[in-house]
Amino acid sequence: MCDVRRKSYLLKRVKMGVRSVCCILLFSLLNSSSAHNDFFTSIGHMTDLLYTEKDLVTSLKDYIKAEESKLEQVKQWAEKLDALTATATQDPEGFLGHPVNAFKLMKRLNTEWGEVEDLVLKDMSDGFISNLTIQRQYFPNDEDQTGAAKALLRLQDTYQLDTQTISSGDLPGVTKGMPFKSTMTVEDCFELGKIAYSDADYYHTELWMAQALKQLDEGEESSIEIVTVLDYLSYSIYQQGELERALDHTKRLLSVDPEHQRALGNLKYFEYQLAKQKKAEKEQSVKEDSKKEQEKTVGKGEYLPEKRKYEQLCRGQGVRMSPRRQRRLFCRYYNGNRHPFYIIGPVKQEDEWDRPRIIRYHAIITEKEMEKVKELAKPRLRRATISNPITGVLETAQYRISKSAWLAAYEHPVVDLINQRIEDITGLDVKTAEELQVANYGVGGQYEPHFDFGRKDEPDAFKELGTGNRIATWLFYMSDVAAGGATVFPEVGASVKPMKGTAVFWYNLFPSGEGDYSTRHAACPVLLGNKWVSNKWIHERGQEFRRPCGLKEAD
């Protein structure tokens, strides 16, 4: 009887397994047919993952309760039978001499033990596994994990943060008692180091393997073995040409695991290379040393690459405006060139920079308007793409870690109202402008230095629009950012911090129609917080009488 039941059970499990495989294959096909979400490029989209994870935790807890209930039933059965068999085995013949005991023994072994077997074999995980399979199609993938890891490395470099600061969660902008402060484990540090290593980025591999080693040395419990960390660490240091330090870490590795084959081989190789290096150094003349020192100092401080200027501005360093120029910057109430609406209720206008002129408007968009714009944009947010100049295929733009969506005026009265407000304040016609673009930045979200207007070497940049070049940019800040996320202009040293409810405006073209190259700008990586912006690119057509052409190129 039991054998029949077991065969029936196994057949049932096989059928269930086939159905599960079919379901998983179906979900896999559905998942592969849909575009990947690039979760790490938008904090707004990542918030959905938190609710997915919360649902999975609830499902997992239900599974645990079901397993505990099953085990409790088995436990009660075992305790009852334990007491019964203890009594019965003291005098088996006497016990079975009672006909009821004999009957119940037959019944237990023929029927009840089979029921216990069914209970023990009953799979309580079906509900949880089904839910997990369904939700997995919405999970981030390896690209997201790598993207988030590289974002941390980018933040580390841009804001010159050491590994201890990041690992401890004490980032700039984090206040005491902040509920969501998070620290990194040895496993987290090791994973960051491995991702850097896979890109042959030995500089960051060393930094994060050293941090993992430090936390292990401080007594943190981890599934990562110290030998593995030392192996990565010594090799990454060797790849950077520091043989002595690589040798020291290799010796420490062998003190922990004397039979480590790769370390034994590396030890001999490092010692040979170090001896060779020292011999070469001795043969080097003083004259050559002097020449090298001279070469190191040549050009020092003369020219800073754009990337360094950009990163300095992101850190709040770099070019400073002279006091004389600062005295020419003012705050004022502005009526939009005597626009009837703004004569009654003028807007607050502040000069952020003089050349190019960058103006900030305070309290220019309401909380309700910002929330409605986010609500409309969020379902449509997509990763920024560019056309590959060789293949023509659309590719994700690696220089822009964000997602964006476009909103037309007819879609909602709020969008139409915002467009009209921009026109009233700037005095420019927005009928030929592009739709309102809404962007949400991801982990370490940034937009590297770029121009908004089309240059002379891009004559067809906006040809399909038929509205001319981008004459001006209007940028709304729809969130505060605790740290990072500034809009910077590396050519002139301007830095504009995000302030919720404000907007900044500048002209990309001179009145002559020539491009103003000083408007090259960038969005600094978001160090802490969630950055939402929306912008309006206003084009030349329709502005002929609103902003007449100048006679000189720089007019």
Image (spheres, rainbow, N blue to C red):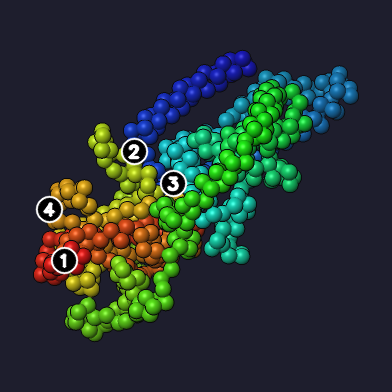
Residue placed furthest toward the bottom = 344
Q: Amino acid at mark 4?
A: Gly
* Position of residue 439 measured from the top left corner of the image (x, y, whole percent): 34, 55
Is residue 284 shown left or right of residue 464? right
Q: Which quarter shows the C terminus?
A: bottom left
Q: Pointers 4 and 1 in contact (CB under 8 A)? A: no
Q: Amino acid at mark 2?
A: Ala
Residue placed furthest toward the front = 287
The residue to which callout 4 is attached is 466
Q: Which quarter shows the N terminus?
A: top right
Q: Is residue 145 above or below residue 409?
A: above
| Residue at the image point whose x is 34% and y is 38% from the top | 35
* Position of residue 461 measured from the top left corner of the image (x, y, whole percent): 20, 49
Looking at marks 2 and 4 on the same chain, the residue that comes earlier in the sequence is marked by: 2
In the image, 410 versus 336, the foreground residue is: 336
Secondary structure under badge 1? loop
The residue to which callout 2 is attached is 35
Secondary structure under badge 4? loop
